[in-house]
Image (spheres, coloured by chain):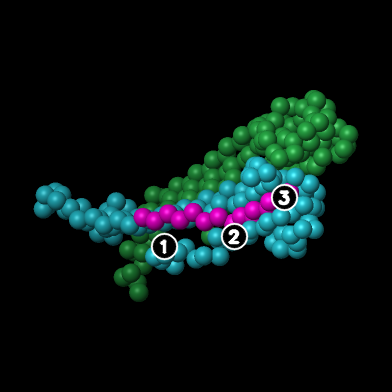
Chain colours: A green, B cyan
């Protein structure tokens, strides 16, 4: 056992000396505030009022009975870990999204909100 | 000294990597409560939040909720014999699998659910799916 101790210690030393780790963060930012939705009213608020409060949408989609304005931003976090002969990578991307539906008269009919970007996390792939 | 040399050489000879990438939030199971002909667009938006994709398809409005899960792994092994033998031996294997969890909801122009499709790609295990044959 004593004969193995020295080689094992050297291998462990190499293992840690040749290891490294890295983190990365990427934000695709659009400055809309979801709290502004409280000031809007379904069945009354217009496209003009919505864009005044939330700004220009990321995407507009034509629907069967009107349009959908989509506001989207994202946050990505990546983690890398290199341990001698084994390497691990983890990447997570989450979105904040607001989708507002308008009828043909440009009156807001529905909306959906998902605020999930802050849940993007660093980590390992298991 | 011998251990040091062997350990140092190993870094260039053998490597194994595991990469995971997740995009989007997990698709909720609550949509299983939805009923065709009765569930409204408003109810779907309240339950599931904002969809990842919105589109019009044959006069109906489609909402798609989606999460993609990428798994990548690779193994490489080599014996650097170039200085001794003139050539070296190496072996490598890589695999990448992208699976999708998604919910597809189709609504009539009046906002009533007309079609629902739920796909849970994440239930397929990595290795079994990678080595399975695609049936035509």
Residue at numbered disc 3: B107
> Residue B134, image x and y in percent?
41, 63
> Residue B29, image x and y in percent?
69, 61
- Specify the principal SS of the magenta part: strand
Q: Which mark is residue B119?
A: 2
Residue closest to the eye, A110 or A83: A110
User: Can residue A51 be seen?
Assistant: yes
Callout 3: 10 Å neighbours few (<14), some, many (20+)? many
> Residue B128, image x and y in percent?
44, 67
Marked residue nearer the N-terminal end (1 or 2): 2
Residue at numbered disc 1: B136
| Placement of A80 over or under B34, stated as above or below | above
Question: From which residue to which does the magenta span run?
Answer: B94-108
Image marks 1 and 2: residues in contact by CB distance under 8 Å? no
Q: Residue at x 86, y 39 (%)?
A: A42
User: Can residue A33 be seen?
Assistant: no
Which element type, helix, strand or loop, lies under badge 2? strand
Marked residue nearer the N-terminal end (2 or 3): 3
């Amino acid at each position: 056992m004593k004969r193995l101790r020295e080689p094992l210690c050297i291998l462990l030393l190499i293992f840690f000396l040749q290891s490294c780790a890295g983190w990365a963060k990427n934000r695709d930012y659009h400055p809309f505030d979801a709290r502004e939705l409280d000031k809007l009213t379904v069945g009354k608020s217009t496209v003009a009022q919505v864009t005044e409060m939330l700004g220009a949408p990321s995407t507009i989609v034509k629907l069967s009975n009107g349009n959908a304005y989509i506001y989207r931003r994202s946050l990505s976090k990546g983690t890398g870990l290199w341990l001698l002969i084994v390497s691990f990578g983890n990447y997570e991307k989450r979105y904040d999204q607001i989708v507002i539906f308008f009828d043909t008269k440009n009156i807001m009919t529905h909306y959906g909100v998902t605020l999930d970007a802050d849940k993007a996390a660093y980590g390992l792939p298991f | 000294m011998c251990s040091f040399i062997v350990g140092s050489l190993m870094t260039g000879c053998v490597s194994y990597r595991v990469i995971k990438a997740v995009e989007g939030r997990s698709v909720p199971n609550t949509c299983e409560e939805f009923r065709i002909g009765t569930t409204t667009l408003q109810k779907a938006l309240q339950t599931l939040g904002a969809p990842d994709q919105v589109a019009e398809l044959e006069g109906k409005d489609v909402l798609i909720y989606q999460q993609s899960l990428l798994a990548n792994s690779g193994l490489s092994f080599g014996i650097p014999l170039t200085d001794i033998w003139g050539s070296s031996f190496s072996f490598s294997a890589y695999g990448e699998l992208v699976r999708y969890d998604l919910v597809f909801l189709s609504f009539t122009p009046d906002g009533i659910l007309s079609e629902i499709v739920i796909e849970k790609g994440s239930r397929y295990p990595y290795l079994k799916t990678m080595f399975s044959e695609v049936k035509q």
